[in-house]
Image (tube, rainbow, N blue to C red):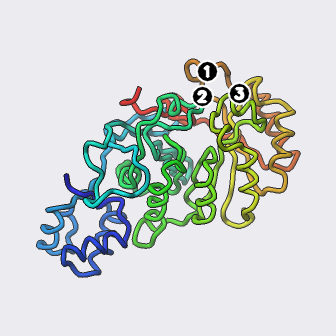
Amino acid sequence: MKIRLLGKNLEELKKIVTDEGLPGFTAKQIAQWLYQKKVRSIDDMTNLSKAARAALAEKYEVGMIEYAGLQLSSDGTKKYLFPVKCTHRRGLNLGSSGQIPEEELEASAVEAVMIPDADRATLCVSSQAGCRMGCKFCMTGRQGFHGHLSAADIISQFLAVDESDKLTNTVFMGMGEPLDNYDNVMRTIEILTADWGFGWSPKRITLSTIGVMPNLKRYLDECKCHLAVSLHNPFGPERLSVMPVQGAWPIQDVIDLIKQYDFTGQRRVSFEYTMFAGFNDTKAHADALFRMLKGLECRMNLIRFHKIPDFPYETSPDLIIENFKTRLNNLGIMTTVRASRGEDILAACGMLAGEHNK
C-alpha cells in the first residue's frame, strides 16, 4: 500500500524529499501541487523531473478520495458522499511505514455539505465517521463511532467537491466531534492556512464542538480560527438528558474556560441552540442563557430542529423561536435564527449519517 502525500505538512514533505535524495525546494513544489494546483497524480507534477516523479511514485501517491455520491437540494445545497477507511487510533502516529496498517482500517462513509449563499460558498466538513458523543437529537451520534478521519480524508473533501475553487469558508460541523480527532483536524487547519497550502485566513474557518476539554483549551491556545459551541440547554440535568457529554464536561465549565479568552477582536465565538418545543424554549431558558453568557462577546444561533426517528421532541413553533430571539437580543446577546438548508436531502443540522452507515 502506497503512502499518501495528501495530508502531509511542509516539514514532512521535506523529510520525504530528503529521503529520496531530491533537492530541498522540491518539498514546497509538491505542497503547491497538492494544495494549490490540486493534482490527482504525481505524474501531473510537471515541474519535477521525470526521474523525481518516478522515484516518488514507487512509494507514494497523492491519495485524494473522490466523492461517490451527490445530492442536490431545491435550495442549491449539495451533499457529497465520500467512501473512507478510518481508524480508531488517535493522533498522527502512523508508525514506521508512515501509513496506518490496512488491517486497522474500517470501511465507512462520510458526508460533506456545500452551502451556497449569495457571494459565499461554505463547505461543512466531517472529521469522523460516526461520533462518540451520542447526542440523542443527532443522526450522526445515533450511528455510533466508526473511526477518525485522517488529515488526507478531511482535505479530500475540500479538493474533490465541484466547487473546490469557489469555496469561501468552511465549518467543521459535519459528522463527528472535531476536538475528539484533534491532531488530524489541526493538521487540516494548518494546511488550510499555510502559505504553502490553501493560504486561507483563519477568519474563513469555524470549528464546532460540544466542548471536549482539555482539547478545547488546546484549540483556544493554538488556533486563531472561530469557535462554535453546541449549547442547546443552559440547565445541566436537562442538557444531560439529550447530551451525555454534559456528564463529563458540564457546559458551565466550558463557558468558564471560554470566558478566559478574548473574543473582542477578529476571532469570534458563537453558540448553537437547537429549539425543542416545550423543552428548552421558555423564558426561563432565555434568562438562564443570559446569566451564563453575561460578559462574553458572543453570538447565539437558534436552529430549527429537523425531526429524526425515535426522538420525542418537535421543533419549537416559529412564534416561540421569534420571541426567544427577541428576548435574548433585548438582554444584550446578539441572536439570529439560522436558515434551514438542505433539509429535503437530509443535509441540514443533525441529519448527516453517511449512506454506508445507515
Residue denoted by label 3: 276
Q: What residue is at 56 percent from the left and 33 percent from the top?
A: 134
In the image: residue 316, left or right of residue 198: right
Residue denoted by label 2: 136
In the image: residue 45, left or right of residue 272: left
Task: Work out whether mark 3 precedes mark 1 in sequence or the reverse, and give the earlier one.
Answer: 3
Residue denoted by label 1: 311
Q: Is residue 315 visible?
A: yes
x and y, in percent, of residue 102 in the image: 25, 45
Pick the residue in front: 339 or 88: 88
Q: What residue is at 84 percent from the left and 52 percent from the top?
A: 294
Mark 2 Cα within 10 Å, few/some/many (few <14, many 20+)? some
Q: What residue is at 44 percent from the left and 73 percent from the top?
A: 195
x and y, in percent, of residue 82 in the image: 35, 41
Which amino acid type is marked by label 3? Phe
Vertical order, 194 against 314 (above or below): below
